[in-house]
Amino acid sequence: MRFKIIVKANKDSEAGVMPSEKLLTEMGKFNDELVKAGVLLAGDGLHPSSKGARVKFSGDTRTVIDGPFAETKELIAGYWMWQVKSKEEAIAWVKRCPNPHAGGAEIEIRQVFEAEDFGAEFTPELREQEERIRMQAEQHKRGGAR
């Protein structure tokens, strides 16, 4: 099972306050544990929403809205992508995580859909297309493009 682990933003992360050397060291050790356990697939911190944008869809119209965005509690400061056996295992790993923000923090755990979760609507042709796209993306990533 794959899970996206979402580190919620706070006023400091939205202000661009960088983590301390101590926190970076602790997170590095935690990430190393995740790698050694075969759990970590990907993960990164994100710039504040002031450097981001949203694209609002309304029918065929697309409207770009530049950050910053007001609701800090709904924003993301960083994420991991993990491969674990269960939600309970993901929770256990999150509980071992260093506190990502001085004071309080919140980390959300969300399961990622797998092909079989979509049922009959995900036809063999769509499954084949999905697998082809995943393989091409992996090859592209290994090639160092961008």
Image (cartoon, grey):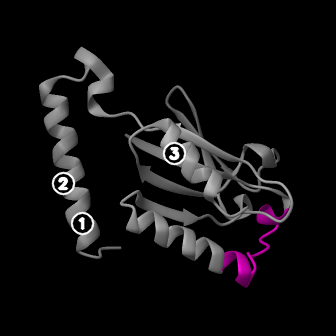
Q: Quadrant of residue 128?
A: top left
Against 88, residue 104 (above or below) is below
Say which residue label 3 marks. 90
| Disc 1/disc 3 C-alpha distance (Å) | 29 Å
Q: Residue 110 at what x, y percent from top left?
A: 53, 38
Against 109, residue 15 (above or below) is below
Against 58, residue 66 (above or below) is below
The label nearer to you, 3 versus 2, is: 3
Q: Residue at x 61, y 71 (%)?
A: 27
* Neighbourhood count class around disc 3 (C-alpha, 10 Å): few under 14, some 14–19, many 20 upward: many
Against 83, residue 36 (above or below) is below
Dot 3 amino acid type: Ala
Is residue 122 a member of the stretch shown in magenta?
no
Q: Residue at x 64, y 51 (%)?
A: 95
Quadrant location, the C terminus = bottom left
* Front position in the image: 88 or 119: 88
Regarding mark 3 in the picture, which secondary structure is present there? helix
Regarding mark 1 in the picture, which secondary structure is present there? helix
Q: Residue 142 at what x, y percent from top left?
A: 24, 71
* Front position in the image: 49 or 25: 25
Dot 1 amino acid type: His
| Disc 2/disc 1 C-alpha distance (Å) | 9 Å
Say which residue label 2 marks. 135
Magenta range: 12-24
* Label pair 3/2, CB-CB below 8 angstroms: no
Dot 2 amino acid type: Met
Q: Earlier in the sequence, mark 3 or mark 2?
A: 3
Q: Residue 58 at what x, y percent from top left?
A: 58, 28
Q: Residue 31 at what x, y percent from top left?
A: 51, 68
Say which residue label 1 marks. 140
